[in-house]
Amino acid sequence: MKNLAVVKNVTKWFPIRRSITDFLRGRPLKYVKAVDGISFNIKDNEILALVGESGCGKTTMGKLLLGSILRDSGIISFDGVALSGTGLESVRRQAQMILQDPYSSINPRFKVSDVVAEPLIVHKVAPDKAQRLEKIETALNEVKLTPAADFLDRFPHMLSGGQKQRVAIARALVLRPKLIVADEPVSMLDLSIRAEILELMLSLSKKFRIAYLYITHDLSTVRYIADRVAVMYLGKIVEIGTVDEVLQRSLHPYTKALIDAVPQPDPKNRLREIKLGVTGDIPSSVNIPSGCRFHTRCPYSTEICETVEPILTDDLRKGHNVACHHAEKIWRNSAR
């Protein structure tokens, strides 16, 4: 499969507003290093999961991929076209986003038909009302809001949380995009609805050959939906590979900590002791530690971790990249 989206060494730093005192005293401007040199690719019809703790830069990366916010440096290309200038306009229609909160991502004053019609109007697709209505009804039927005619004139307050998210998916689907950035699409939903939404997303991916960047902090859903997974920490990708490789044979201590924190469905293990091996709080993304940015919490940390930043490589397993000075030691320990 060819690469649909390619991200190379992308950075995005947000400046922190200085107080008058800081300005008068000549204190330097500080930045939140949300995305700090990231590289990855997404292939046609592939689902790449981007996982990590809150505040690690996942959502920022998703917005950068869509061109919703502009990068500071690096290269982003979509379907062979650079994400800048006229290339940015061409991506607007080919790539869409599903936001986390279905309660706030839909205009409460819009009817369902207006919500789904908005992308068609903005991109001047199907200017004829009859054609537009046909596309709206088709999209609603594809997300299992049937019969579609019963939902067209409803307002968001008349829908359940799961139905609202289906409307949001229909809005993203109506333009037939090649890529959808799904930012925590099930985290605000009841547990009974999550599996239905994930199954819907999978079926739409197969039917229309849609690729996803699936952003989440919940590893329990990653194995079900994703082909590959990238683990992000403080603006950097620390491990990336196939789902089986990363989740079953993880090589980075941060990935192991995330996996160990996933709740177990077995009632006997409900009160088990979680041995993360990780101590301390997450460092500030304004003052990132030198060397490996995970060394302040890592049980494997040595002197080299404090001074030398590890490079994302696949020296141990081809196609399974990890940024850790002690990946070989972790690999040997897990093989025993």
Image (cartoon, helix red, strand yellow):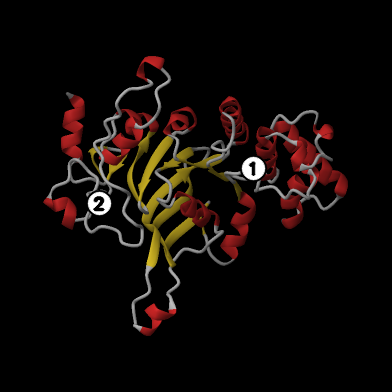
In screen coordinates, is 213 left or right of 158?
A: left
Give the SS element for disc 2: loop
Q: Height in image: 44 above or below 86? A: above
Rendering quarter of residue 53 = top left
| Residue 157 vs residue 259, the one in the foreground | 157
Q: Position of residue 79 (x, y in %)?
A: 53, 51
**Amino acid type for the residue under numbered disc 1:** Pro
Residue at far front of view:
21
Q: Position of residue 60 (x, y in %)?
A: 48, 55
**Mark identifier at residue 311:** 2
Rendering quarter of residue 143 = top right
Quarter of the picture containing the C terminus is top left
Q: Position of residue 204 (x, y in %)?
A: 62, 33
Q: Residue at x 23, y 45 (%)?
A: 324
Q: Height in image: 131 above or below 209? A: below
Give the SS element for disc 1: loop
* Dot placed on the residue nearer the N-terminal end, 2 or 1: 1
Q: Residue at x 45, y 72 (%)?
A: 17
Which residue matches tag 1? Answer: 102
